[in-house]
Image: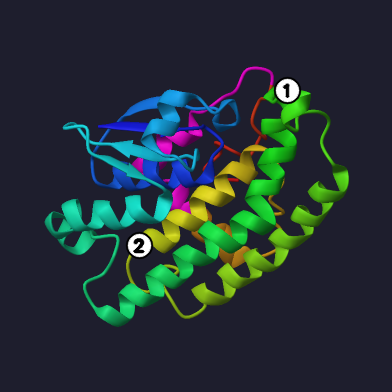
Amino acid sequence: MQLYHHPFCAHSRLVRLALGEMGIEPELIEERVWERRPDFLMLDPAGSTPVLVEDDGFVVPGIDPITEYLDETRGPKLGDRRLLPVDIGARVEVRRLSAWFNHKFFAEVSEPLVREKVYKRYMPRELGGGPPDMAVIRAARANIRYHLHYIGWLLKARNWLAGDRLSYADLAAAAHISSVDYLGDVPWDEDEGAKIWYARIKSRPAFRPLLALTVAGMPPAPCYADLDF
């Protein structure tokens, strides 16, 4: 199995976490989507990561199709470790919260911070590269606070974000937060419940490859790989 990804793409991180929970180690192929490589566009005309390619060449592009595909093809064998529950009501809640982080948190926090602080460093100026827009960064830093409060509020009545068991909702939230945490932009003193939850999920074996990530010229924040942050 191959995964076309970018180290800071939160959606790619979610797929890596899900595969890790399933005991699958894909071949990672880094993709800089702004380069618009023809071979990559043949896999996904939308030109975005992640894209999953099965051993037989079957292509699954995009975060929502990939998570559904993995559940349909691998989920039943996971038993009580299945990331999308069998109960219809529980499935709706997992999908709702996954969408919250994959779309709302992405638009308000992780995408602007990663774009301004990471992608623009490598993009040519004619494609939008250049110095970060500090107004965008300030807005994203302000937005993350109410997302952390929402996580804390959910956890007052639940063991995990969507219920009693770990699910795609937790992996989605953790994937997006981890991309921001690398940059040092998560105010962990904002909500104790959110911090405790993240420490739990951060300590799982599937998270280790993400915590080992380093980028030349851009070291992670001191708390990024610290399990006792």
Rendered view: 186 above or below 217? below
- Residue type marked 2: Ser
33 displayed left or right of 207: right
N-terminal-most mark, 1 or 2: 1
Q: State the residue at coordinates (76%, 54%).
A: 141
x and y percentages locating residue 170 in the rendered image: 44, 60
- Point out which mark residue 200 bears: none
Q: State the residue at coordinates (63%, 44%).
A: 181
* Element type where label 1 sits in the image: loop
Query: Mark 1 — residue?
Result: 124
x and y percentages locating residue 164 in the rendered image: 34, 72
Report the coloring of the rendering.
rainbow
x and y percentages locating residue 42 in the rendered image: 39, 32
- Point out which mark residue 167 bears: 2
The N terminus appears in which quarter of the rendering?
top left
x and y percentages locating residue 36 in the rendered image: 54, 28
Q: Residue furthest top?
A: 216
Residue 25 magenta: no
How many neighbours does mark 2 have within 10 angstroms: few (below 14), some (14-19), or many (20 or more)? many
Question: Picture quarter containing residue 180?
Answer: top right
- Residue type marked 1: Pro
* Residue 77 in view in this figure: yes
Q: What stretch of residues is rendered in magenta?
A: 199-217
Question: Picture quarter containing residue 216?
Answer: top right
